[in-house]
Amino acid sequence: MDAERIRFFLPEEKKEEKHAADKEKTYELIIVGGGPAGLTAAVYSARKAIDTLLLTKDIGGQILLTQEVENYMGYQYIGGKELIEKFKQHVQRFPVAMKEKTEVVRITNDEKTFTVETRDGESYHAKTVIIAAGKRPRPLNAKGEKELVGKGVTYCSVCDAPLFSGQNVAVIGGGNSGLTAVVDLIKIAKKIYLIESFPSLRADAVLVEKAERSDKVEKFLGYEVLEVLGRGRVENIKIKPKQKDETKTLPVTGVLIEIGLIPNSYLAKDLVKLNDFQEILVDCACRTSVPGVFAAGDVTTVPEKQIVVAAGEGAKAALSCYNYLLGLR
Ligand SMILES: Cc1cc2nc3c(=O)[nH]c(=O)nc-3n(C[C@H](O)[C@H](O)[C@H](O)COP(=O)(O)OP(=O)(O)OC[C@H]3O[C@@H](n4cnc5c(N)ncnc54)[C@H](O)[C@@H]3O)c2cc1C
């Protein structure tokens, strides 16, 4: 029944058509973010015939960092890249204007419209906005770290651990992500230094046991990383116990940083209310503190950061936006 209705207002020749972003018009909706929340919002808004523009840095969001997914309904197992491709194809069947490789830096409002500004100096306009900008890896902010990103420093163990086969590496972070990285590296790395700033590990017992069973793993609990050193590539890291003033230098060619994620709410920090963790405050209908601005997925205060939750919130945000637009008409 639904499929028939879509075919009715989406002729066959339009289904794969690319729609360019238009700076001159005022869209009914701009969605920021091309992860599960933003892409699902796009499908729902298109099905309500809302004139929509989606602006995003990439298509896929955190799923790009995920090798396999075992908890998205309908698939007992699916690779991260395969799931993104399916999401993307789904959106492309609808007439949604989309601009990738675009970072939104600021959203402002006047009485009737929102202006969405991008890093490359462009501005787009809409009557409503859905912010679905998700989260990004938290940096250590150690000396030398920034300069050596991609040259031995990585924030995605899932993607990059295989690059360190046979090498000495440091994993920073004693939570589930850090310990998952350690367990994966046990099979391929020569030596793994696990560095955690707290005096104990915070990961699930099963992961901790696996790490502790391996003689390749050496733990430094209660230590901080002072500096990542190397000429052109990582060669060493300098660490220090939090309580003492002595430093150690560990010979590593890889530094895998797994210390959590931060919400990408910076683009709306002067527009909507955030909580203490920089998440956008939303009610159960994805409404933010500003009428006409909705938010969905990991960037919000909604608990449980999962693909299925983000997708569901994206759907809700689009339907709330539809009801809001009806009130404006
Ligand atoms: C390593 C890893 C493994 C995971 N494994 C699973 C799993 O197995 N199962 C599961 O359910 N969940 C898993 N998750 C969590 C899941 O990926 C997230 O909950 C989900 O992706 C959140 O979706 P989102 O759309 O809210 O945000 P994101 O996926 O973070 O997407 C945000 C989107 O916004 C874009 N964006 C960000 N800032 C801007 C900006 N300023 N301007 C324009 N665009 C912007 C990004 O490019 C991206 O497209 C995993 C997460 C990680 C990191």
Image: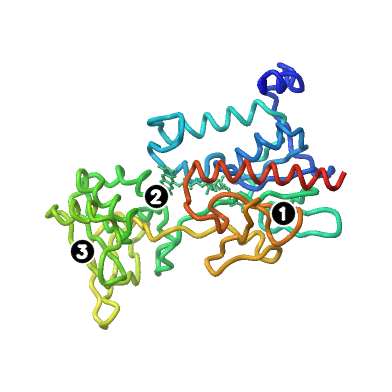
Q: Residue at x 43, y 67 (%)?
A: 141
Q: Which amino acid does label 2 sit on?
A: Cys
Q: Which residue is drawn at 73% across and 60% down?
A: 290
Q: What residue type is labelled 1?
A: Val
> Which structural element holds mark 2?
loop
Q: Residues within 10 Å of mark 3 (few under 14, many from 20)?
A: some
Looking at the picture, tell me which residue is in the foreground, 72 or 241. Answer: 72
Q: Residue at x 34, y 72 (%)?
A: 226
Give the total of numbered labels.
3
Q: Disc 1 beta carbon < 8 A from ligand 1? A: no
Q: Do the residues labelled 3 and 1 touch (CB within 8 Å)?
A: no
Estimate the x, y position of residue 104 in percent, counting from the top left: 66, 53
> Which quarter of the figure has residue 322?
top right
Q: In which quarter of the image is the N terminus?
A: top right
Estimate the x, y position of residue 12 in percent, counting from the top left: 71, 16
Residue beneath disc 2: 156
Q: Disc 2 beta carbon < 8 A from ligand 1? A: yes
Examine the rendered structure and indicate whether residue 281 appears above or below residue 323.
below
Q: Quadrant of the C terminus?
A: top right
- In this rendering, would 183 be left or right of 53? left
Q: Earlier in the sequence, mark 2 or mark 1?
A: 2
Residue beneath disc 1: 293
Q: Earlier in the sequence, mark 2 or mark 3?
A: 2
Q: Which of marks 2 and 1 is in front?
A: 1
